[in-house]
Amino acid sequence: MKLNPELKKQLIQVTLISFIVFLFTVSISIFIKSRQSLPNSLVTRRDNTRISSTEKFIPNQELNEQQRFLDTINYQLKNIPSTDTYEYILLRAYGTIFINQNSEIKLPPKVILDNEQETETFQQNLQLTLVEGTRECYLQTAAAEAFNQARSIIDIPLKSGYSGDCTRSYATTLRFWQKYTNNSTLEQVKQGKETNILSLVAPPGTSQHLWGLALDLGVLNPAQKRALNENGWFQTVVKDTPHWTYLGWDEESLPKFGLRDKTVQGITYWVTPI
Ligand SMILES: [Zn+2]
């Protein structure tokens, strides 16, 4: 049978189009399958936009605590520092904050704010609120409200009563650092040779007090500690007893994100597992 040339041409076109559609469908289904086979946490890490502001990231509980912590902070931090760096030392010391997922708070984009200018730019974007009953203690609003709530249960005094107990400027953190250290201390911290100092004072640009999410408080009894814990505030820097951090979770949630409890001299701190 001899086909009409026009019909033959149409038949070839239809066959070609069908083949292309077939190839497209196969590659799409292979792509979807490959994404489904990844652990949930990895899928989320690759596409943070899938998490809405009200939805919380809970890491895969089958992972070990270090991996749960890293997956969680990967959701908040743009870059996780590599293990042999100064940034990693600071992440270990002060990084509990990055599990905070309260949608109203802002976390710094990195562990170290490099200078006064960078700190000011970050702080200008914070919504700060004066803590009730104080003259100059400012915190990010959600942290201030949680602290007010704790203080509505029981009175909790600030450590000094001055603004330095709460949100600090870069210049203040620099002054505190210089007060307790000498010229070689920072270099020793960077080389990992000196870590004790981190319980006493944070290197310039690294204090949780720059982020509006930390408080230094006066002597505390168990009832005051309980009121703070119930409102998302925890001691997170071992041996820095007056220092409290707003993690924004209840205590039983903290291990979900890999945090470890560490009791030193009768005080329980929640620390990073790295
Ligand atoms: Zn402090």
Image (cartoon, rainbow, N blue to C red):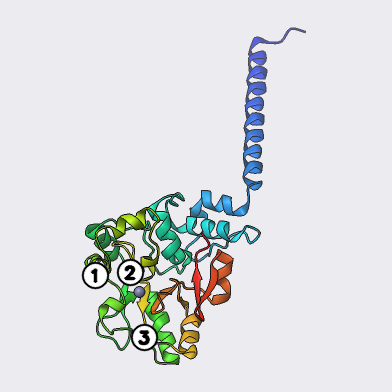
Distance in Å between CA atoms under marks 2 and 1: 9 Å
Q: Quadrant of ligand 1?
A: bottom left
Total numbered labels: 3
Instruction: For ligand 1, tell me if the residue under mark 1 lies within 8 Å.
Output: no
Q: Residue furthest right?
A: 1
| Residue type at numbered disc 1 | Lys
Kind of residue indicated by mark 3: Gly
- Badge number at residue 45: none
Question: Image quarter for residue 260?
Answer: bottom right
Residue drawn at x 39%, y 88% as measured from the top left: 156
The answer to the question of whether label 2 and label 1 lie on touching residues, with beta carbons closer than 8 A, is: yes
Pointer 2 residue? 201
Q: In 3D space, how far apart are the residues under numbered discs 3 and 1 (Cα atoms)?
A: 21 Å
Q: Is residue 178 left or right of residue 223?
A: left
* Labels 2 and 3: the sequence-earlier one: 2
| 173 over 150 or under it: above or below | above
Which residue lies under the disc numbered 1?
A: 179
Amino acid residing under circle 2: Val
- Residue 219, quarter of picture: bottom left
Q: In the image, what residue occupies the spot 22% across and 58% down?
A: 117
Q: Nearer the viewer, residue 21 or 177?
A: 177
Quick one: label 3, few (<14), some, or many (20+) residues within 10 Å?
some
Residue plotted at (36% across, 77% down): 215
Sequence-wise first label, 3 or 1: 1
